[in-house]
Image: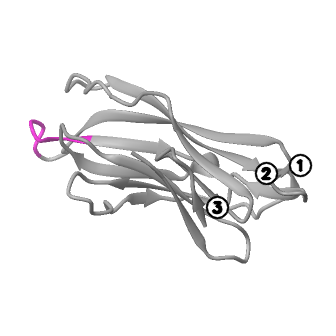
Amino acid sequence: MHESNESNAVEVNGIRFETVVSERVLTIPEAKRGVYTLVELGIRVTNNTQMPFYFSYYFYSLFPELIAPDGQVMQTGIRCERINLPIESNYVLVVPGEAVTFSHDAFLFWLQNRKKKRDRKLTLNIPFPDQDIYSFCPLYPDTYQFRFKYRQSGEGMEEYSYS
């Protein structure tokens, strides 16, 4: 595995993975219903090999992770309502020398406790296709790292970090 000089990219067997975040510093939204900060999170895959490869945006190929200020990977709450099986159109062919970027809009907002209305937790939700939602909570004003793990069909997990 080869890591680039950039902290948000890694190259594995000629495939370069780069985590893309629209904003390095997020504004904490007001603690009001319906108020949120939007951030685009993504992964750019560049094929630096001589062979074409297929990559999937769906079906548990991309796993978002948030690393807390203490270096620990935060647990995610995931809600999955998937009922469809993968189909050919869920895969993108990336030819040698080309790149594709898969991105998601994520939402930073205050989640209100249903029983204790004044109790709110800062939350980052990342909706994925097919109604999956990755949720990281509680968050506090500090520095976090975001990364994706990508699983190629039939292979192990690989990590691609952004800090």
Q: Which residues are magenta?
A: 116-122
The amino acid type of the residue labelled 3 equals Ser
Query: Where does the C terminus fall, quadrant-wise?
Result: top left
First in sequence: mark 3 vs mark 1: 3
Q: Does dot 3 land on a helix, a strand or a loop?
A: loop
Q: Which quadrant, please, contains the N terminus?
A: bottom right
Give the farthest residue toward the front.
Answer: 5
69 w.r.t. 35: above or below? below
Q: Is there a contact, CB below 8 Å, between mark 3 and mark 1?
A: no
Three-letter amino acid code at disc 2?
Asn
Task: Report the residue marked by disc 3.
Answer: 61
Q: Position of residue 84 (x, y in %)?
A: 73, 60
Circles 1 and 2 in contact, beta carbons < 8 Å? yes
- Apparent side of residue 26 relative to residue 150 in the rendered image (left or right): left
Residue on which the image places disc 1: 95
Rounded to the nearest whole Å, what is the CA distance between mark 2 and mark 3? 17 Å
Image position, residue 48 (x, y; %): 79, 52
Residue 101: name its quadrant.
top right
Residue at 36% of width from left, 25% of height from top? Answer: 37
Around disc 2, counting alpha carbons within 10 Å, would you say few (fewer than 14), some (14 to 19), or many (20 or more)? many
Task: Quote the CA–CA distance across marks 3 and 1.
Answer: 19 Å
Ranked by sequence position, the earlier of labels 1 and 2 is 2
Find residue 91 and report its horizontal and vertical position in percent.
81, 54
Quickly name the residue at label 2: 47
